[in-house]
Image (cartoon, grey):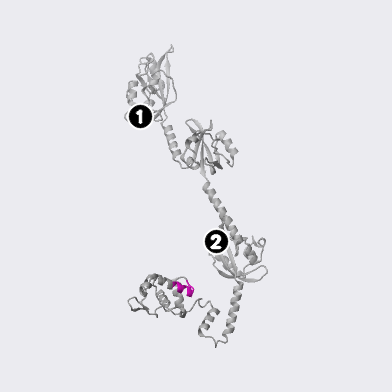
Amino acid sequence: MADVLPLKSLRDSADLRHLRQIITGLDEGVILVDPDQSILWANDAALGMHGVESVGALGATVDEYRQRFQLRYRNNHRLEDNDYPIERVVSGERFSQVVVEVAVAGEDAPRWVHQVRSLVLTDDQDEPECLVMIIQDVSAQFEAEDRFEQSFNANPAPAVICRLCDLRFVKVNQGFIDMTGHDRQAVLSRTVYDIDVLARAEKRDLAKERLCEGRTIPQMEAELDLPAGGTKLVIVAGQPIDMGDQPCMLFTFADLEPRRKAEGELRQSEERFTRTFSLAPVALAIGTLDGHRLCDVNEAFADLTGYAPAEIVGRPLDEAELWETPALRHAIEAEIEAGVAIRDREVRIRVKDGEVIDCIVSTEPISLGGEACVLWAMRDISTRKASERELVHAIEAVMKDTSWLSRSIMEKLARIRAPQLEPQGVGLDELTPREREVLALICRGLDDKSIARTLDVSGNTVRNHVARIYSKIGVNRRNAAAAWARARGFDGDSIPVPHHDGQFSRETAA
């Protein structure tokens, strides 16, 4: 126990009663200690800060107080007996702003956080007459600081805090460590300008001015240097805060590196599109949906239409009178506005010198610079159409005298003359018997496995037959093959198909 100063007791003095009257209603807790280490009195605030209702519950003496309340520092270290504020008061020590956590004896978790200071009352001879322990309950303040600490550390958004008095970093969270790769201890031993969080900021002068004044730093882009080399594009902002009565600045960051990477990839993609667009051998043009105005054309488009880019870019297609008729223009524009993509549409367009040519047109909706556009692709088929017309004229001339032509040749010439009436490809008589059996089963709805079981052949054999049938008749789907057969009066029912048991079947698939 600490040595006790030879204090004159205030216990039986009228001054004690007057002193009690003065401090009874104070918000601060006040405990009066007698020179013999007994606790003379405590006001209601002090009792409430210890969770008791009477002075006796605090303990009659300093020793009893230590037995009933366990104190520790904020770093969880328990106080030795001589370090208790009440012991230090008794020893005559003057102190202020001692912060301790207070727990009831037998409990592990502290209930309160007290900020304590001492006061020595002296008599007429300037001798200590009464020792006073003055207490403030700062539990709410430290709980708030603990919550902030936990929130700061758990926040995934990168953040650091620096003191304004010396611009030294005092806190850094895991988000900042992960974003930059800095070592935590290395950050906490350095200043804002050692690790420049405002490096290459777009408004660096404004940010430095606000930092010096302790005012809010608005959001701005900056580029942080990384310890491993390279930089990190971020948005940085600063917010003044107080930590333990110390003015500080909280810097928060948003990582813009994914955005920069995406913008770079988008830029490269647009550059590749531009090169492909310019060098494509097919006539290409880009137009807006609003007014069908052309935004760009490639060299092949200029060659096809005869218009130089400067003559047609920026003009609506109807103003350039590119379509052969207004009706055709209205029909195509209506489909574009309805979001319908045109595929290989045969149209006739009017080029710059007034000539009308045959073209195949396709469109595709695209987005350029955030604007909805349409990509036009045109291919000149005038030569092919002229050849087809010449061939039709030749066929018509030959068919005027057909006495020397066979029936098979006549049918083929008729199909060439009117291709829209009969699909291209061979006739049924040019399929092998096995291929006709396979086609018959396709028409009945059987799949490859069922056909293999029916014909008692392997699946690979069936697939080879199907592939040859597709190749001969010019289709690539089962439904199309069945439609081709039925268009020629062949539905498969008329073809007896041998079953693997040796019988013949005309049954259709279930």
Instruction: Look at the image and give the residue range highlighted in magenta.
Output: 466-475
- Say which residue label 1 marks: 103
Residue at (42%, 17%) from the top-left corner? 121
394 shown above or below 365: below
Q: Nearer the viewer, mark 2 or mark 1?
A: 2
- The amino acid type of the residue labelled 1 equals Ala
Residue 58 in sight in this render: no
Q: Position of residue 219 (x, y in %)?
A: 55, 42
90 shown above or below 264: above
Which residue sits furthest bottom? 403
User: In the rendered image, which quarter is residue 295 located in?
Assistant: bottom right
3 shown above or below 391: above
Badge 2: residue crowd in 10 Å (few <14, some 14–19, many ≥20) = some
Q: Position of residue 270 (x, y in %)?
A: 57, 55
Measured Cα–Cα span from mark 2 to mark 1: 72 Å
Quadrant (top left/top right/bottom left/bottom right) for the N terminus? top left
- Say which residue label 2 marks: 365
